[in-house]
Image (tube, rainbow, N blue to C red):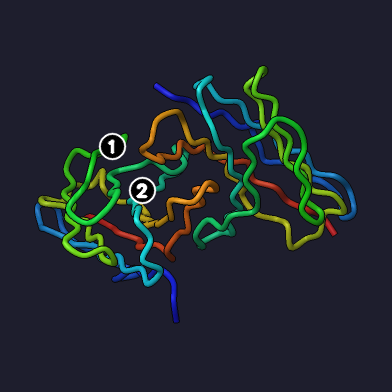
Amino acid sequence: DAGITQSPRYKITETGRQVTLMCHQTWSHSYMFWYRQDLGHGLRLIYYSAAADITDKGEVPDGYVVSRSKTENFPLTLESATRSQTSVYFCASSTLDPSDTQYFGPGTRLTVL
Amino acid sequence: QKEVEQNSGPLSVPEGAIASLNCTYSDRGSQSFFWYRQYSGKSPELIMFIYSNGDKEDGRFTAQLNKASQYVSLLIRDSQPSDSATYLCAVMGSGSARQLTFGSGTQLTVLP
């Protein structure tokens, strides 16, 4: 089915480990985004990408790395996970049309012990 | 820093009533405004977007935008228990980056 998927859906890791969260969309949307959602903070933008090989920082990029070698994939890597990175991570994508609507993936719940 | 504030919840309304959700934003150059609904444990889903001053209606939902007051609202008429969710206001600021700034959300409960 067309859409936006994330994997894994749930992940438990330990402090200091590297973790990669995957995001894949089948719409060929130009823009892709990574958010984290924490109680009391709403959704905060980590990184975004306007096209393949074009990425930029959002509001809370520290501790995260992204890449986008293909339009459909936008992985997010936590280079050395910390407990403060325990959160729910959402990937989103959007077109260039005037509505600029962002469509969200199902999310990944990450726990860092 | 761009800010988006939503009226503090939780908000409870009886079934059939009108639910009113409010949002203010700090970036006067903001162009587009979105309302998302998020059920517990699920991802946000778009309800409506608006970018012109005035009202925009879609079924039981009406979005209202007042750029001079930097205010956007969402009215839900004939509220149903299935409308119980957290409603997120999101604002796309000036510039071409298409970044959204989200409010922290208002939790709505519709009582049968």
User: From what the image shows, is residue A44 above or below residue B83?
Assistant: above
Mark 1 belongs to chain: A
For image coordinates 22% across by 46% down, the residue present is A55
Is mark 1 in CB contact (under 8 Å) with mark 2?
A: yes
Q: Where is residue B62 in the image (x, y as percent from the top left)?
A: 77, 45
User: From what the image shows, is residue A11 above or below residue B105?
Assistant: below
Q: Where is residue B35 in the image (x, y as percent from the top left)?
A: 61, 45
Secondary structure at badge 1 equals: loop
| Residue situated furthest bottom in the rendering | A1
Q: Pointer 2: residues within 10 angstroms few (<14), some, or many (20+)?
A: many
Is A17 on the left-hand or right-hand side of B21? left
For image coordinates 45% across by 40% down, the residue present is B100
Q: Pointer 1: residues within 10 angstroms few (<14), some, or many (20+)?
A: few
- Which image quadrant for residue A92? bottom left
Mark 2 belongs to chain: A
Secondary structure at badge 2 equals: strand
Residue with the mark numbered 1: A60
Which three-letter amino acid code belongs to the residue tagged 2? Arg
Is A93 on the left-hand or right-hand side of B59? left
User: Foreground residue, A58 or B40?
Assistant: A58
For image coordinates 30% across by 70% down, the residue present is A7
| Marking on residue B44 | none
Q: Do labels 1 and 2 share a chain?
A: yes
Which three-letter amino acid code belongs to the residue tagged 1? Val
| Marking on residue A36 | 2
User: From what the image shows, is residue B51 above or below residue A9?
Assistant: above
Is A49 on the left-hand or right-hand side of B44? left
User: Foreground residue, B79 or B72?
Assistant: B72
Distance CA(mark 1)–CA(mark 2): 9 Å
